[in-house]
Image (tube, coloured by chain):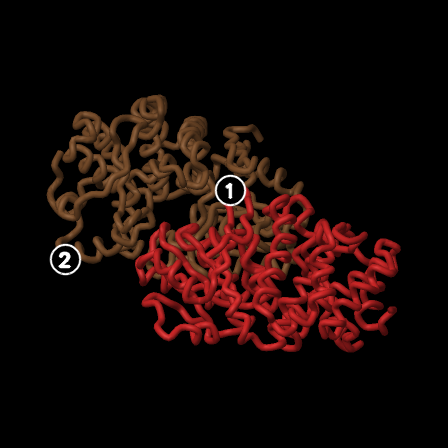
Chain colours: A brown, B red
Amino acid sequence: MKSMVTTQLENGRQTEVLLADDLKDLSAHLGEYGRLVLWVFDTNTVKLFKQLPPSHVVLESGESAKNFSSLERILSSALDEGLARDGRIIGFGGGVVCDMSAFAASVYMRGCRLTLVPTTLLAMVDASLGGKAAIDFQGMKNMVGSFYPASEVLISIDTLRTLNEKEFLNGLAEVIKHALLSQDEELYKFLLMRKNEILSRDPKTLAALVELSLKVKQWYIEQDPLETLGIRQSLNLGHTFGHALESSSHYLMWGHGACVAWGTCRALEAGVVLGVTDKAYASGATKLFKSFGYDIEYRIGRGDWIEYRDHLLKDKKKVDGNVRFVLLEKQGSTILMPLDLQLIQHLVIAKPIF
Amino acid sequence: MKSMVTTQLENGRQTEVLLADDLKDLSAHLGEYGRLVLWVFDTNTVKLFKQLPPSHVVLESGESAKNFSSLERILSSALDEGLARDGRIIGFGGGVVCDMSAFAASVYMRGCRLTLVPTTLLAMVDASLGGKAAIDFQGMKNMVGSFYPASEVLISIDTLRTLNEKEFLNGLAEVIKHALLSQDEELYKFLLMRKNEILSRDPKTLAALVELSLKVKQWYIEQDPLETLGIRQSLNLGHTFGHALESSSHYLMWGHGACVAWGTCRALEAGVVLGVTDKAYASGATKLFKSFGYDIEYRIGRGDWIEYRDHLLKDKKKVDGNVRFVLLEKQGSTILMPLDLQLIQHLVIAKPIF
């Protein structure tokens, strides 16, 4: 185990991200917690263990498990196992397992201990750090949840080896988004220069990629842990456009990351139209997404606009009834603003403008 | 509206408790929030209004409504009404409505605004201040919840006029408990001297009683808002004994406050047996409870011990597997300690010792 990132949060809480040599190293670390733990897997990650820990829950894999029923299953198992407030929930899986475990830990006896072991690239660079936990509710993504940072996040790069291509690209979209939000160009250049090692999943390259990406996220959340100051909302770049696509297609079409890649390019276009974003920068960023294989030129059908718009208008980031979008002024600098519905419609159903 | 108590909590948050002249004064204050609100009533409190606010949910009255299904109903209505994070949930009712509204507000979009209007004495002196929200889960009281202080608590003493006797005594038990925990004897003396005005529900007397009681609670929660320092746990005096009675009798027998009165007397007895509590003080406090009509001499049947014990052992306040009880060293000074099961059995099923 080596320390990767330590994030300072409100009330003196912190999240320590540790890099394990491999799954065995990681299991040895977790074994030290003894018996007052409950593991949460999904039907994929449960296969990574030959011998399962005695107290565990296995959720269905996939976004559809992010619901009240999964929450109740985890809470019920924790109660059956006799966990008290000083007991620990260990979420071992992708974003859904991390979100469900964190939400359950936040409400179990009003808060028990939490370790997250993200096993997908998306969960490593996004869901595991920053304390946001949520479930989907009535078809709306992440509508119900809490802020509850894990005390530790354990990363074992070898879990990325067996990830399917779609899942891997889901995570990479958030990494590219972080590259645009970074205060320096290190991650952006890393993505340009090391594309082949990244796509061939060279372990050392991926460890460096995850660390660079986490450091960008860390910068934003340390300044605004509860998303009350308008700083952390920058991390939602591409998410308002993207979530509405995810929700209105009922989570069936693309993964979260692919929607974020698509949504980020829509936000870049909106910025160009409004004179907020430099056209050359937007064009370069769009090319970077394309070079990793994202279908950023996709547009929704005219008949799907109403449903898309309705999901957009239910976005959590409304203030006084207006949905505010994150636009990019330049590398690492964002601005929040409402967008005209006609412009949005033009961007999501018209032909690409560059 | 006049300010009663302002409690400072973590992260610069605060809860302001305001005393309204009457329900009309209170409604006028709430009317200023406009349309981005959702009211939560129960089947009793909904009758207090001739004209209902357009956006509202009505829960069944009683402890059985403190469940996931009520939570989902509130969240679903909030979503239907288009509430965003800057929307407000107004909980108008007793402890169940306050708890459900606060828990819902804490998880809706990871936290929206919250006003509580406690309409029972118990909710005024307990549930509305301090940010503890919870639901019962699998027969276990307050097993799932969060810390989420209301930004404002509005108290209208006229809602106490129609409270039935049992409900009124439920609240009074917490007031007497606060009298024992207070750093001075003002509340204790007030209870001794003003018994008749309290029981005849003289409005001015009740307003003074609520204020004195809230100030005791305030003292504890300001020092330990998240109950992590062992100070706030003093407020659980009587609750470990009492909750187990409440849970093991399936919430059917007595109200919460009556169980707390009973549990506090058991804790006083435990303190006397262990030489922690002064016998004369314990005896005086027990008489105070008795003088207000509590059945503190009740003992559980021998055949109910196993179920009682099982509920006791699932208490949230376990550390390293041991349930810790709040005992009273003297007025305003407590100590947390585990108790031997044999002693507990002796106290809850044997004859009274004084």
Q: Residue A204 at what x, y percent from top left?
A: 45, 26
Closer to the camera in the image, B134 or A165: B134
Mark 1 or mark 2: whose residue is earlier in sequence = 1
Asked if the residue at tag 2 contacts the one at tag 1, i.e. Cβ–Cβ closer than 8 Å, the answer is no
A206 is higher (above) or lower (below) than B169: above
Image quarter hosting the C terminus of chain A: top left
* Residue A42 is at least partly visible in this image: no
Count the marks: how many? 2
Q: Quadrant of residue A213?
A: top left
Q: Which residue is the site of mark 1? A: A149
CA gap, disc 1 and disc 2: 41 Å
Report the mark closest to the observer, 1 or 2.
1
Query: Could you tell me the amino acid type at mark 1?
Result: Pro
- Residue drawn at x 42%, y 36% as measured from the top left: A125
- Residue drawn at x 54%, y 35% as measured from the top left: A14
Q: Chain of mark 2?
A: A
Q: Chain of mark 1?
A: A
Disc 2 secondary structure class = helix
Could you classify mark 1 by the number of other residues whose Cα lies within 10 Å: few (under 14), some (14-19), or many (20 or more)?
Answer: many
Query: Could you tell me the amino acid type at mark 2?
Result: Gly
Q: Residue A111 at what x, y percent from top left?
A: 57, 50
Q: Which residue is the site of mark 2? A: A303
Q: Residue B54 at what x, y percent from top left?
A: 32, 67
A160 is higher (above) or lower (below) than B134: above
- Residue drawn at x 41%, y 39% as measured from the top left: A126
Q: Quadrant of residue B107?
A: bottom left
In the shown orientation, is residue A197 left or right of residue B241?
left
